[in-house]
Amino acid sequence: MSGADLTQLDTVLEADVGIVGAGPGGMAAAARLAAAGVRVVVLDEGQRAGGQIYRQLPVGMHNHGVVQEPPSHDDGHNLIQSFEGHAKDGGEIELVRGATVWDAQPGRLWFEHDGVSRLLRCGHIVLAPGAYDRCIPFPGWTLPGVVTAGALQVMVRGFGVVPGKRALVVGSGPLLLPTVTSLLGAGVEVVAALEASSRMRALRAVPAVAFHAARRREAMWYMKQLWRNSVKLQWGWTVFACEGDGRVERAIIGKVDAHGRPRKGTERTIECDVVGAGFGLVPSIEVGMRLGADTHMLPVRGGHCLVVDGEQRTAVATVFAVGETCGIGGAEVASAEGELAAAAILRELRGTTVASAVVSRARAERRAADSMLGAFAPLPGLHDLARPDTIVCRCEDITRLRAQEAAAMHGDSMRAIKIGCRAGMGPCQARICGPSLQAMATGVNACAMDVPVVQVPLKPVSSETILTAPQ
Ligand SMILES: Cc1cc2nc3c(=O)[nH]c(=O)nc-3n(C[C@H](O)[C@H](O)[C@H](O)COP(=O)(O)OP(=O)(O)OC[C@H]3O[C@@H](n4cnc5c(N)ncnc54)[C@H](O)[C@@H]3O)c2cc1C
């Protein structure tokens, strides 16, 4: 539908429940609510349901090769099928594709859709906006061809783009494995896969994987893919720098110590035309904060996360939060929490009980994820990779040295650094540089970061959208 086709009436939608995000968390909540006859509107920036992990190609596009999918994606396809079944004409779910939520109040979500400013009025809100890639700046990270692991997934799986011929995959955490297999499926040679955590540290994840049937099956599947394609995961290695004339042509790689600090004398040069750097994920909390939810800092879950009670309710009684916005945990956690939030809302709307199995599944999935991800929590020493002239804020072109000078002159807080040098004040609003900026400017522990300041618009939208926002 084009903007011109929308009548004044269309600019305001009404629903019992409004959901932000059509990933596993949002889809699971929506499908359960819809099955009970509750009218749900789901808003998502993407063009298809699935979120980041079950990303689908836009309608009408075909893939360039065979992107292999791990066994867990069968659950994802079933979830998408159930969600889309309820979203067919006349169904209980309305999915608004390409809808960017830029402001929120309890009971109201403002979004830009097809260039038109729209409003969703709803009794309850479920937040499932997912996460962002965690970027760790290193010399050459802004060269064309150097992208985050998540962005590589989006290119290959979301748009069928083959990003190069020889890829280097670096970083830390479970997302490295799907990145490697997607690239292999797209016919890209993976010249090396470097995990910054040591093998010893990674062993801490073994019990959480070994005693969880789905994760165990998943890990075996990835190991088989790597072995078949002769890709060896190198533990305790990372990228020190990327170089090239106008785009990445080579990377300097080397070993890091237990804290992630680069070890001198271990450098090697490797030729490549793509580098996927994935140092974990950071929860997307801005919509929740704008709505009045509390946050807490949990390094094992990626940083500041929304606080929820045992039924996924935030500090605001009608606002629930599920999945990565409550801390990084993966698709199983997101869908289990989505079901739990839906069950709690159904109790309020329909008087039904919340089954204890639904509560225990969500708790068990979260516990298992926490103990697995502990082995890959951010390594503070990786911040030593950036040199004084390395850009740390790419929106405003601020180097590490300038950020350090700003901290020395104005103070160690995120606010002081921002005011002192404009770092974090560009279009990304510190989503890219924020998690590293304060540590790099002040030299304190990598996990120390002030709670982000949330500004409206929460995402970049046109000024026309803000000026014409329905009330
Ligand atoms: C870039 C990226 C790629 C990833 N790729 C993989 C992968 O290949 N394999 C894997 O195992 N895990 C992957 N992950 C991790 C994966 O996101 C989670 O494990 C899982 O999908 C979390 O589910 P969720 O429902 O919490 O959020 P998500 O699946 O992230 O879904 C969140 C949805 O919310 C939407 N959204 C966010 N903010 C707004 C807003 N303001 N307005 C409207 N819509 C909004 C997004 O478009 C998205 O569709 C990836 C993460 C990222 C950030």
Image (tube, grey):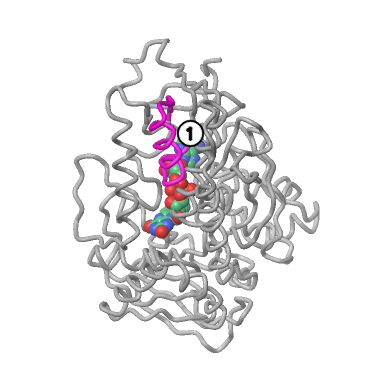
| Residue at the image position 38 percent from the left and 39 percent from the top | 46
User: Is residue 440 something that shows in the picture?
Assistant: no
| 299 is higher (above) or lower (below) than 294 | below
Q: What stretch is highlighted in magenta?
A: 20-41
Query: Observer-nearest residue: 368 or 412?
Result: 368
Quickly name the residue at label 1. 19
Residue 208: percent from left, percent from top: 51, 70
- Quarter of the picture containing the N terminus is top left
Residue 137: percent from left, percent from top: 55, 63
Residue 124: quarter of image:
top right
Q: Few, some or many C-alpha atoms within 10 Å of disc 1 (few <14, some 14-19, many ≥20)?
A: many
Residue extending farthest to the top is 8
Instruction: Classify mark 1: helix, strand or loop.
Output: strand
| Residue at the image position 55 percent from the left and 83 percent from the top | 200
| 128 is higher (above) or lower (below) than 18 | below
| 93 is higher (above) or lower (below) than 46 | above
Residue extending farthest to the bottom is 265
| Residue at the image position 65 percent from the left and 69 percent from the top | 380
| Residue at the image position 50 percent from the left and 42 percent from the top | 128
Compared across the picture, whether 213 is left or right of 349 comes to left
Task: Tell me if residue 30 is in the magenta stretch.
Answer: yes
Residue 272: percent from left, percent from top: 34, 72
Residue 134: quarter of image:
bottom right
Compared across the picture, whether 84 is left or right of 268 comes to left
